[in-house]
Image (spheres, rainbow, N blue to C red):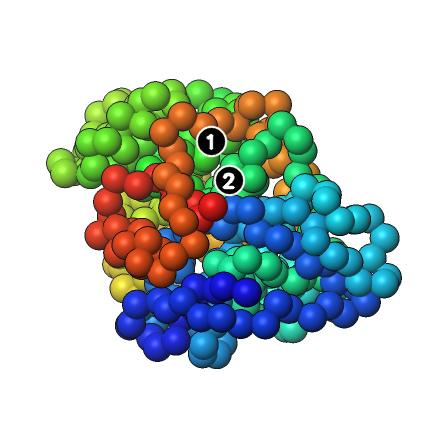
Amino acid sequence: MKAIRLTRIGAPLEEQAVEVPRLGAHDVLVRVCAAGICHSDAHYRAGVSPVARLPLTLGHEVAGLVEETGKAVQNFRPGHRVCIHYLVTCGECGHCRAGNEQFCARAEMIGKHRDGGYAEFIAVPERSVFALPDEVPFEHGAILMCSSATSLHALRKARLRGGETVAIFGIGGLGVSAIQLARKLGATEVFGVDINPHKLKLAARFGAIPIDARNDPVEQIRALTNGRGVDVALELVGLGRTMRQAVQSLAVLGRAAIVGLTRETFEVAPYSELLNKEAEIIGVSDHLASEIPALLELARSRDLDLSAGLIREIPLEADAVNDALDRLDNFGDDVRVVIR
């Protein structure tokens, strides 16, 4: 089969012909119909976040059709529409039993530790496969599996409650979902922070108050909240500067959820920015399989809108994939790119 693979860190991805994955008894072979391109994939290519081995097929946002199943698979048959939770875990350890499977010592992330979805087929255990509702297109199902799922997990980690205010730093694939999910969870005001005029228009389209970060976003947020700040800030960019701004934008008892990947550090003034407010900085790692059914229902009911100009589709070709990754590195206009 055809696959687009990372062969050298810091080098463009390459097209290779590889064997179709073999199935174990509990595995599902999925014919990939859509694979999202995530900013994390650009980090893997650059070496910001290390992959387990080379060469490796990237891609952790995957939706498609069941092609074949192992003998012990019970809930899926060829032709079923599915999407894939990107963590393959043991299902037995304490973290897995507690529903925190992202910390499973044997966990493997598709597209990072094992071959992912930039290919014609992918095989994963049945417990990582979820039925994709007929109402949800494959390209939506793919990006739900990372950008939307991680946004929901971040808001839950930040303990967003109805009536609170939220600032979202970075209006890309995660940010557009985060705005809608924050509103659905009862946020009264959502501020969408970015430097890209196109993305600021998207923030406004989905009901957020746009904050142009080319001018100090913390000052703007404080001015619009009568000096109070926000209850929750999500940092989705992966820059030390925006992480610091997220913390500085917090109100008393505020929570900053840090999602973006970076090698950078950032400074915090412990007394004025944390202790004196009892504010919190919360790390966010991936998302949980238990959160996916609710997310799929939000997409099925159109409470989470991923349509109309948010997705750019490209073919399964190395040049097109590398161009999309380059655009992510440069914080371009794309909200989400999906390989069809």
Q: Residue at x 40, y 41 (%)?
A: 313
Where is residue 102 drawn, in percent x and y? 60, 61
Kindly identify which residue carries mark 2.
Answer: 139
**Measured along the vertical axis of the image, is residue 242 above or below residue 40?**
above
Q: Amino acid at mark 1?
A: Leu
For the N terminus, the image quarter is: bottom right
Task: Say which residue label 1 marks.
Answer: 306
- Judged from the image, the secondary structure of the residue bearing numbered disc 1 is loop
Can residue 325 be spotted in the picture?
A: no
Label 2 crowd (10 A; few <14 / some 14-19 / many >=20): many
Is 278 displayed left or right of 209 in the figure?
A: right
* Residue 305 image point, x, y percent: 49, 27
Residue type pointed to by label 2? Glu
Of circles 1 and 2, which is in front? 2
Q: Secondary structure at mark 2?
A: helix
Q: Position of residue 175 (x, y in %)?
A: 39, 38
- Evaluate if marks 1 and 2 touch, with contact meaning CB atoms under 8 Å apart: yes
Q: Which residue sits at x=22%, y=52%?
A: 330
Please tell me which of labels 1 and 2 falls first in the chain. 2
Nearest the camera: 332 or 289? 332
Question: Please, is residue 242 above or below residue 307 in the view?
Answer: below
Q: Is residue 20 visible?
A: yes
